Amino acid sequence: MRIAVIGLGYIGLPTAVALATRGIDVAGVDISVDIVEQVRCGEVPAVEPDLAVAIRGAVGIGRLTAHTETPEADAYILAVPTPFQSDRTADLGFIQAACKGIATQLRGGETIILESTSPPGTTKQISQWLAEDRPDLVFPHQTEGAPDIHIAHCPERVLPGRIMIEIVTNDRVVGGITQACAEKAAEIYRIFCQGEIILTDAESAEMAKLVENGFRDVNIAYANELSLICEHLGLDVWEVIKMANRHPRVNILQPGPGVGGHCIAVDPWFIVEAAPELARLIRTAREVNGRKPAHVAEQIIAKSARFMNPPSRAWGLLSKQTWTTCARAQRSTSSGQWRWRCRPSRSTSWNHTFASFRADWPNCRTSDLPGAPRRSRKPISSPCSSTTTVFAPSTRPSSSARWSTTPAACGVESATRKPATRIHRVIL
């Protein structure tokens, strides 16, 4: 058996690898030449735990190949994007383009599975598109008997970061245009899926995936709307939710800056599209969560206004895991000098030592910085802000090293500046 997976994204590629590592010849197809070349080289175009090793193994044993054109295969799995358009209706252009590529390769007897999250009726629409391109074949929407091509829908339901685990262990819903279509598709998922496989019709499978994410969106919206109400009333929403959740049958979620992930912000709109006059609660929940990021941003701007003109301070960084240091900075009130003391451990590594000063001390010279060597001094970009200059010494001090510099040398009035009282160890 040979299976072609159309779309090598965060769902298509793990699905292709799961099949290939179980002895199936898999042809991965993607319109991106870069992704195809990376897969051919056994490289991972995206970050996902355990995926890199699996891809190298699948490519190494010759079970996984990558292409920009759709080849002949015994089964096709469509895992292409389904974004929404400006009017928040589903954009099925990627699915239709994939069908165009598949249509020319059909001989009869193939199984086509849609994994992309889609509005109800999309799987049947695939059958109709293919029938238009291949009138010589019989498709499942055209007959109650045995069709030449079997078409089904099996929505993905995995969590990024755990895809390689959940793609195997999670239960799967497989909905066919006919019962025979569902059973044909289920045979493919039994190759690698250890969870239960539930058979149903295509529209129910499509709706089930949308309902899963719509349910989460509505519950998140309830918590987010509570946070807005409590803010208006001057109440602590966290305390209110904590007390309400003491009820044995109440479990309110925590409010946040909207929703995350690939699906929850998009999928509920497909339900609204299917029944716009009836999906009032789902629409409202999506609008509440959609407005929350801007509200949080406004709060951050308001709260951070007091940091627009912070007091100037001198600060330093001593780093590397092996640099277990106890450092102190203190000023002698009589001499007005800064004295920096550092006690390195026995396994001192001086690979990275930073002495950093705010740029509002413009006259500060590199040689005036505590610990700055007399050679190999070069400025490096600041990890903190564009207003900070950082210098990295490249020499190793002795265990009894002591450095000092006067604030006057840095253009600072010692009477008005307060030194940092502690330098913390930082691991870079």
Image: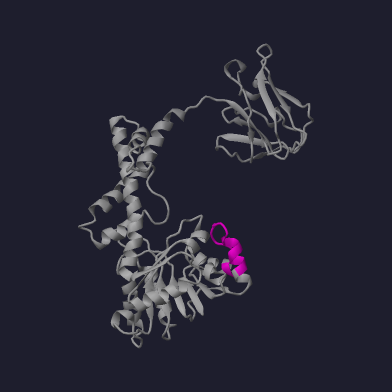
Camera-side residue of 319 and 150: 150
Q: Is 37 placed left or right of 129 in the picture?
A: right
Q: Is 164 placed left or right of 290 in the picture?
A: right
Q: Is residue 289 visible?
A: no
| Relative height, residue 128 to residue 37 (above, below) | below
Q: Residue furthest left?
A: 277
Q: Residue furthest bottom?
A: 136
Q: Residue at x 39, y 40 (%)?
A: 297
Residue 54 magenta: yes
**First to last magenta residue range:** 39-57
Residue 365 magenta: no
Q: Residue at x 32, y 37 (%)?
A: 244
Q: Residue at x 28, y 36 (%)?
A: 229
Q: Residue at x 49, y 70 (%)?
A: 30
Q: Is 350 placed left or right of 69 in the picture?
A: right
The tally of labels here is 0
**Quadrant for the C terminus in the image:** top right
Which quadrant of the structure image shows residue 374? top right
| Relative height, residue 140 to residue 159 (above, below) | below
Q: Is residue 25 visible?
A: yes
| Relative height, residue 194 to residue 128 (above, below) | above
Camera-side residue of 207 and 64: 207
Estimate the x, y position of residue 399 in percent, counting from the top left.
Answer: 78, 29
Estimate the x, y position of residue 386 in percent, counting from the top left.
Answer: 55, 38
Estimate the x, y position of residue 413 in percent, counting from the top left.
Answer: 60, 18
